């Protein structure tokens, strides 16, 4: 059908290279024509044109990306999901259009990929940002082409981000096993001597989490790990913006801790069933992941 251009790499890392490649895609008339045809065929052209203030016959990758990253989320959630599912169906194919569809999906998910990468970087004994970024982008492309996401219930962006993160974590875990105990020792050393700013931040997050009921045990449950604190910060932010309710936040925080509360015990605390509590956590994780994907990358 068409060949996706590959401009010469820049010096700014893989995300900058993807942005440079994206500019070339947007300028390619053949790519624009292909995107227009897709949207017309999938009966999405009029809606995308409406939310991007464009003519149907001028729709291209730029307008498609704008529809996938809407400013008015309340109005555009349904359209965003429909457009992303249509792209993922094409990405699961075996022709050149599948490659292009997957590439557009990747561009839409760059903000989420950047955050995943930053979340996995460790200052001592770990892989660099660029190494993890390359692993993340490769995982994102593999998941987009797999065909799993467009057949799965729920918001596709959330499913896509979660599957990508699982791939990245598995890859990093395998790498740590191969490199032996030195990495674990280095990571322990990095966490053993936090600076004053980190101590202050830890205390602030810990106090806010306790006040919000996110700590499953008494205040003396022990020092939270960096990963645990990062999760608590995300949950607290989501509760503050209304993305998660207090019960949603507890459903996540009580489960992802060193000594997790079982669904049966958690359900007994709040007066519900274990199955209902598990479903609440699954929905809360999907909403949290979707909200992270829609934030700016910077």
Image: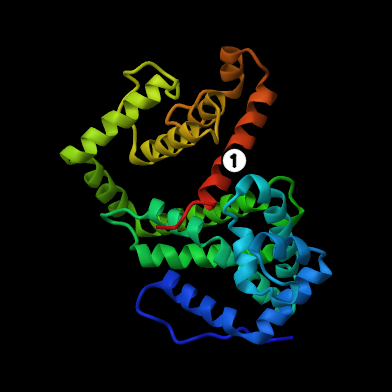
- On the image, the x and y values in percent for residue 96 come to 70, 81
Q: Which residue is mark 1?
A: 287
- On the image, the x and y values in percent for residue 41 come to 83, 70
Given residues 69 and 2, the one toward you in this image is: 69
Q: Which residue corresponds to the image point at 63% horizontal and 68% vertical from the top-left?
A: 63
Residue 188 placement, left or right of 258: left
Residue 148 in view: no
Q: Which residue corresponds to the image point at 60% horizontal and 23% vertical from the top-left?
A: 263
| In the rendered image, the vertical position of residue 101 relative to residue 200, given as above or below | below
Residue 47 in view: yes
Name which quarter of the figure residue 233 lies in: top left
| In the rendered image, the vertical position of residue 37 relative to residue 123, given as above or below | below
User: What is the quadrant of the N terminus in the image?
Assistant: bottom right
| In the rendered image, the vertical position of residue 111 relative to residue 291, given as above or below | below
Residue 106 placement, left or right of 128: right
Q: Which residue corresponds to the image point at 44% horizontal and 32% vertical from the top-left?
A: 236
| In the rendered image, the vertical position of residue 277 relative to residue 32, given as above or below | above
């Amino acid at each position: 059908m068409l060949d996706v251009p590959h401009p010469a790499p820049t010096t700014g890392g893989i995300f900058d290279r993807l942005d440079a490649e994206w500019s070339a895609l947007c300028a390619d008339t053949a790519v624009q024509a292909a995107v227009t045809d897709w949207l017309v065929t999938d009966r999405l052209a009029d809606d995308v044109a409406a939310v991007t203030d464009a003519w149907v016959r001028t729709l291209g990758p730029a307008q498609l990306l704008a529809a996938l990253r809407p400013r008015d989320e309340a109005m555009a959630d349904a359209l965003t999901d429909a457009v992303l599912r249509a792209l993922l169906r094409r990405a699961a194919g075996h022709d050149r259009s599948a490659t292009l569809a997957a590439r557009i999906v990747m561009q839409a998910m760059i903000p989420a990929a950047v955050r995943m990468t930053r979340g996995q970087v460790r200052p001592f004994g770990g892989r660099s940002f660029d190494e993890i970024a390359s692993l993340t982008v490769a995982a994102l492309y593999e998941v987009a082409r797999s065909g799993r996401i467009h057949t799965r219930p729920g918001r596709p962006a959330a499913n896509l981000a979660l599957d990508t993160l699982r791939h990245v974590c598995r890859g990093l875990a395998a790498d740590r096993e191969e490199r032996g105990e030195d990495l674990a020792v280095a990571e322990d050393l990095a966490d053993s001597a936090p600076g004053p700013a980190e101590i202050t931040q830890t205390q602030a997050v810990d106090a806010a989490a306790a006040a919000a009921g996110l700590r499953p045990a008494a205040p003396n449950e022990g020092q939270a790990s960096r990963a645990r604190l990062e999760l608590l910060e995300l949950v607290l932010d989501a509760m503050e913006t209304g993305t998660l309710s207090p019960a949603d936040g507890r459903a996540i925080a009580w489960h992802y801790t060193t000594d997790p509360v079982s669904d049966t015990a958690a359900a007994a605390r709040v007066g519900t069933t274990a199955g209902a509590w598990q479903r609440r956590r699954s929905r809360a994780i999907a909403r949290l992941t979707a909200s992270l994907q829609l934030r700016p990358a910077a």
